Amino acid sequence: MRPRRCPALLSALLVLLTNAAAACSHAAPSRFSDADRAAVVRVLEEQRAAWNRGDLEGYMAGYARTPELVFTSGGHIRRGWQETLERYRARYGGDRAGMGTLTFEILTVQSVGKDGAVVLGRWKLEGTPQAGAGVFSVVVERRPEGWRIVHDHTSSDPPPAAAP
């Protein structure tokens, strides 16, 4: 007896294999790439540009909009995107005049697996009563909306020593 062929079954198998191959071609990245490093740096550069045009909401777009966001500075721990925004608004006012000019120096971008990085850098703020400088480390995570800061630890340099 000759085996029967089932065209519908073969067609369904072909569709299944084609879809599986397509899914594999769009799989999540397997490592932290140079493009990822550039995207992480771009988040910080976009924050700097937003800050310097007085756009506090644009600056906050670099942070994950989640209650799990952690921001530490000046011995205080703040949790959540909204609380962080409110603290920035209270301190800087949310306009160009109160925000001054911000610069960053990114010292390192260290991958933490394929979907995370720790950025170490220096910051400097001029042209505002809150002027200062210091260091920061941020944890950046690959999220559906792109790379976003999920943890920010910022500290200020000590004041200069008094002249003798």
Image: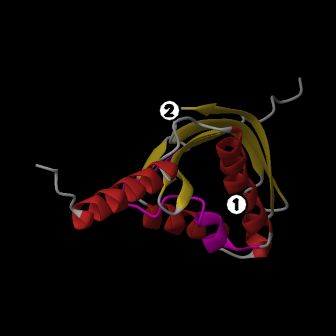
Quarter of the view holding residue 126 = bottom right
Magenta span has 64?
yes
Q: Return the residue at label 2.
A: 113
Q: Residue 113: percent from the left, percent from the top?
A: 50, 32
Q: Residue at x 65, y 45 (%)?
A: 36
Amino acid type at image mark 1:
Gln
Asked which secondary structure carries label 1, the reply is helix
Q: Amino acid at mark 2?
A: Gly
Relative placement, left or right, of 30 versus 136 is left
Instruction: Please tell me whether residue 149 is drawn above or below residue 129 in the rendered image.
Output: above
Near mark 1 (Cα within 10 A), the count class, few <14, some 14-19 or many ≥20, is many
Residue at the image position 75 percent from the left and 39 percent from the top: 122
The residues colored magenta run 54-72
Q: Residue at x 55, y 58 (%)?
A: 146
Image point 81% across, 28% down: which residue? 161
When asked about the image quadrant of residue 131, the answer is: bottom right
Look at the image and tell me whether residue 98 can be seen.
Answer: yes
Mark positioned earlier in the residue sequence (2 or 1):
1
* Residue, disc 1: 47
Q: CA distance from mark 2 to mark 1?
A: 24 Å
Kindly state the secondary structure of the residue where label 2 is placed: loop
Instruction: Decide: is 95 above or below 11.
Output: below
* Residue 16 percent across, percent down from the top left: 32, 58
